[in-house]
Each structure stands twice: as C-alpha cells, then as structure tokens.
Amino acid sequence: MSKLRVASILFLLSTFFLKFSSMLRDIAIAHLFGDSYVVDAYIAAMTIPNAIILFMLTGMKDAFLPSYYKYEKLGKGFSHLTNVVKGTFWISSVIAVCGAVLSPLLIRWLYPSFTGHGAEIAVWTAVIYFLSVALVGVNAVYEGYFDSQKKFSFSTFSQTIVVLCTIGGAILLYRQMGIYSVPFGYFVGTVLSFIIKLVYLRPRRFLMWSQPADWREILSFYKVFLPIGLTIAVGQINLFIDTLFSARLGEGVVSNLNYAFRLVNIPQAIFGVTIATLVFPLLAEAKVKEDMQLFRTGIEKGLNYMFLLLAPTIAGMIVLMRELVQVVYERGAFTAAATAQTSEYAIFFTGSVLFYSIQAVIAKGFYTLEKGHYILRAGVVSIIANAIFNAILSNVIGAIGLALSTSLVGFVYSAITFTTLYKLAGGFSLSVIGKEYAKITISTLVMCAVLLFVKHGLHADHLSVVPYLVIMIILGAVIYFLAAWLFRVESFKEIVAKGRIKQVSDS
C-alpha cells in the first residue's frame, strides 16, 4: 500500500509539474535574461520547431493507443510498435535535418527585423530544437506505449526529465552559454529521456531490430495520426502567427507577450483541463447508452462548472494583475518596466482563457460523438481569423492588439464549435445555461466591487505585495462563494451538496 501511495503521489506531482513546465521555464528565463532582444530571438525561433514538437508529442498518444490495441488483439502489438517507431524515426530525422539546414533561411524570411547577434541567436536556437525533433517523435511513441501498458507514471516521468534538463541548463549554464543554455538543456533532456526508455525496456524489448519497416502499415497509421495532430496543433500554429507579428513591434514585445500568456493560462491549465476531463466519462456513458439527453446534460454541467470556477478567477486576476506579474516574474533581469508592460498585455489575454476553456468541454462532446473533424475545420477558421485580427489590430493599437486578437479568436473558435455541437446534439437548454451564467456573473461583479473598494478605498495595495495578494485572494474567494450561495447558483449548490457526484450523474 505504501509503495502504491508513493507512486500515486509521484505521478500527481510530476503531472502537476508538467502542466506548468512552460511557465517554470519562462520564470527562469525572465530572471536570467529579462525581456531583452536575446529572449525575443529565442522565443521567436523556438516557436517554429516547437510547433512540430508539440504536434508529435500531444497527437501521438491519441493516435497510437487505439492503433496499438487493435494490433495487440491480433497478436501483433510489438510488431506494430516496431513499425511505428522505425517509421517515426525516419520521418522525424528527415524533418530534423531539413529544419536545421533551412533554419538560416527560415529566420531571415520569417523575422527580417532580427539582425546581428539577435539573428545569430535565433538561427542556432532553431537548429538545436530542430535536431531534437529526431528523437522527440520516438519518445512520443514510447510514451504512448507506456500509457497503453498502464505505466502512466513512467510516461510522465520521461517528459519531466526533459523539462528538468531545460530549466537546469538555463540555471547552471547561462554564464557559460547565455541563452543557448535553454535549447541545449532541452536537447540533452530529449536524449536522456530516450536513453532512460532504452535502458528501462532493455534492447531486446525495445523493438524488433531485424524486422523491416512495413511502410504500408506506417502510412496507414499516419493517416489517422495527421488529422489528430493537426487538430491539437492549432493553438501552437496560432501562437506562431502571433510571434511573427510581435517580432516586428520592437524589443521586449515577444518576450512580454509570452510571459503574459503563460501567466493567464494557469486557470485554463487547472480548471479547463480538469473540468473537461471530469465531464468526459459522463459523455462516454451517454454515448454507450445512446442517451442524447444525458449527453446534453453532461455538456451543460461542464459549461456551468467551468464558468463557475473561471469567472471569479479571471476577474480576480484582472484586478490583481500587476501584483501577480510582480510576484511571479519581477526579479533579477526582469524589471518594474517589464512588469508594467506584461501586466497590460495579460489583461487583454484573459478572454482567451475563458473561451478556450469552454471549447475544451465542447471538444469532448465532438470526440465522444466521433465527430473530431469538425474541430479541425473550426481550427482552420481560427487560424485564418487570427492572421486577419493580428494584421488589423497590431496596426491600430500595437502589441496590445495581438493579445486582444487571441481573445477574439478564442471567442470565434468556441462560438463555431458550440453552435455546431448544438445542432449535432439536438440543442441545449440555453435558458438554463443563460440563467446560471447570469447568476455567476452577478456574483463575480459583487466580488470585484468589494476587492476594488478594499484596494483603492482602504488602500490595501500599500501593503507588501505578498501579504496583499494573500489577503485579497482569500477575501475574493469568500465574497464570491458567499454571493453564489445568496444568488442560489445551482452548480455551486451541487458541488457543496452531499453525494454531489451521484446527483450530477442522475440529473
């Protein structure tokens, strides 16, 4: 029992760490390099190969698990693993070599404003990350394989190694290597993660070395993988488009937009993913029972719970944004001026947190109904809309326009997917959702009014930043939930009621 408990704790900790890995990396970078042109060049260059890396990492599991199970039933699971690994290695290697060779041309073409040392940093950052792609794909396949064997902790641990090496490289080697310490740490972590898998499985159980690659089977697998990977990569593609525009707006814009985006996405990482995951079993149960009423109820509950938790969190962040940025980032090379700029950008990013979290629930509905291609179509529309909004708003209001564009695109994305699912599911109880959202909005406004009075009327912001944030967060939570109780918010009552899980399912 004790070993199981330790394993569970390690799994939860490593999963939590992964959720915030990008932000932890950025906190280290902000401390060491601030918002200088060095960081601008690193982030801009990293987004190119990183789109491919996330495409492989996040899409591979969703495609490999059902494919592996299908072949395992036929007694060909290990053979299928071998084919996918060999095919992925060669495909990833070609991408890695081509990307590394073409990096100077890509940087010059995509970021013409980068010159001198900045251009040099961008090129070598892209080269190092592209070279990592050769093993990223293989690592992703094996992490999917470990999940298929119910070894979730090991799969998460192997990803954690990469993150630790990235952060460790930045902290330990920045004096010797500068910003190159970050991509170098990632490359070392990728290699080390691969070696750990090889040692853990042992060469004989790693793959069938003598088996020739069956390219017909490999291509059949990739026909399934590509649309899944592209659907998941939509967000990264939009982030890449944002970077293209922000790189032309002056030093520090790329960096501070990135820092702001990472910070405001914490609620999405916590509530968005969690609520969508909790709703999924109810939707799956409805699909098995062919009960569309239960399916609609599951979506409605997910949307209500999502807004119940996100509305006060986002509103509270807006009120306390400057202090939050100060506590998270302002140290070392990250100055008060950078805090002011990052805080301003972060406020305009907050809309995206709400809309993309809502879309996370809606997406589970599409996947349950096996209609994932609708998500891909909506994603393509969002990419086009993002480019248009960025072009217009960045010219009108500058860098703030890029943050606002992200929120507007999130609204378009969630609106398209919601209306599409509404038709597929035969409609939702819009009056029930609307009434719940109205009550939650009123409760949130009450909370904001109290916080603003305490902040400006009672001058609580004159306190030291950490005690101030602690007091305001606790006070905000108390006021909000008290207001939710007074206004009889149904989703809040369900959560605090005894036997709430059964009540939600039975409803």
Image (cartoon, rainbow, N blue to C red):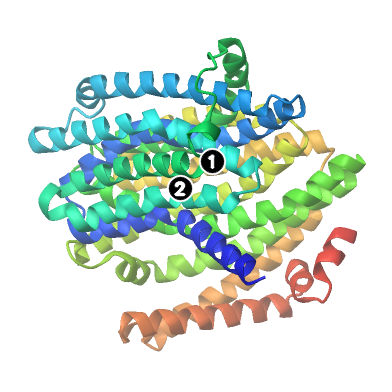
Q: Is residue 291 left or right of residue 156?
A: right
- Residue nearest the viewer, comparing 190 with 98: 190
Amino acid type of the residue that numbered disc 2 sits on in the rendered structure = Gln
Which residue is pictured at 53% across the width and 78% down the height? Answer: 476
Residue 360 in view (yes/no): yes
Residue lying farthest top? 216
Q: Secondary structure at mark 1?
A: helix
Identify whether 98 is placed above or below 51.
Answer: above
Q: Position of residue 198 (x, y in %)?
A: 45, 38
Which residue is pictured at 59% across the width and 82% down the height? Answer: 478
- Cα separation, mark 1 vs mark 2, equals 8 Å
Point out which mark residue 143 bears: 1
Q: Is residue 278 left or right of residue 286?
A: left
- Residue nearest the viewer, comparing 223 with 189: 189
Q: Are marks 1 and 2 in contact (CB under 8 Å)?
A: yes
Position of the C terminus by quadrant: bottom right
Identify whether 393 is placed above or below 90.
Answer: below
Residue named by callout 2: 159
Q: Position of residue 32 (x, y in %)?
A: 19, 58
Which residue is pictured at 85% across the width and 38% down the height? Answer: 426
Determine which quarter of the picture holds residue 49. top left
Q: Around disc 1, counting alpha carbons within 10 Å, would you say few (fewer than 14), some (14 to 19), or many (20 or more)?
A: many
Q: Position of residue 294 (x, y in %)?
A: 87, 49
Identify whether 129 is placed above or below 435.
Answer: above
